[in-house]
Amino acid sequence: MVGIDASLEFKPVKIAILTISDTRTELTDTSGDILESKIKLSGHEIIYRAIKRDTIDGVRNKISNWINDPLVDVIITTGGTGLTGRDITVEAISPMFDKVIDGFSVIFHQESFKSIGLSTLQSRACAGLAEGTIIFCLPGSNGAVKDG
């Protein structure tokens, strides 16, 4: 079977969005805006949305709080998955994973390759399960968020 089983009842997912950036604000967080719009159009619910600076401790603390919050089913981060010294999302979050969802990165890069070619190699998009909460870590570019 390909796709989603249409006979299953739709159940909205409760999602927290975290933008990880030293430069974005509520007014300039366009990737967070795109995520929020796509999530709402899909019928899911935004429980929290926040911006955190690129610090491992700050990101881990916010993610830990959301993992322990019974209202949150899924966490989606945007930003900090690149290759520069300030890109700490993967280092901050991946140690928290109980299980890595390897297939997400594969599919993300396949979709991203269609838009940006080999530049997709600069992203370390990843996903995993942490204490029952699914976490997706996306790059901060608008195009990557649309692909994700």
Image: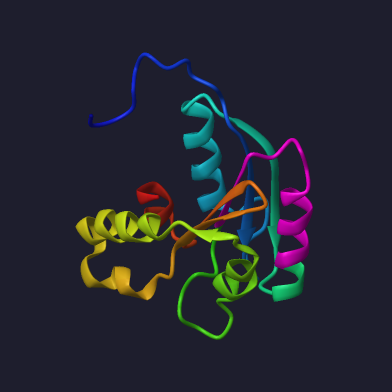
Q: Which residues are magenta?
A: 59-77
Identify the residue at image location x=46%, y=28%: 42
Task: Tell me where residue 97 appears, x and y as whole percent.
Answer: 60, 62
Along the viewing direction, whichever of 127 and 129 lies nearer the viewer: 129
Nearest the viewer among 138 and 27 is: 138
Quadrant for the N terminus, please: top left
Specify whether 79 is left or right of 51: left
How many numbered markers are drawn?
0
Quarter holding residue 14: top right
The x, y position of residue 98, in whole percent, is 60, 60
Q: Quadrant of residue 73?
A: top right
Task: Looking at this view, name the residue that lies furthest to the front.
Answer: 98
Residue occupying image coordinates x 54% and y 64%: 79
Q: How is the image coloured?
A: rainbow
Q: Residue at x 59, y 75 (%)?
A: 91
Picture layout, residue 20 above or below residue 34:
below
Q: Residue at x 66, y 73 (%)?
A: 54
The answer to which quarter of the image holds residue 18 is bottom right
Residue 62, placed above or below residue 86: above
Q: Residue 142, percent across and down?
A: 43, 54
Horizontal side, residue 91 vs residue 144: left or right: right
144 over 12 or under it: above or below: below
Q: Is residue 120 left or right of residue 83?
A: left
Judge whether residue 116 is colored magenta. no
Query: Seen in the image, is 112 located left or right of residue 46?
Result: left
Say whether residue 107 is visible.
yes
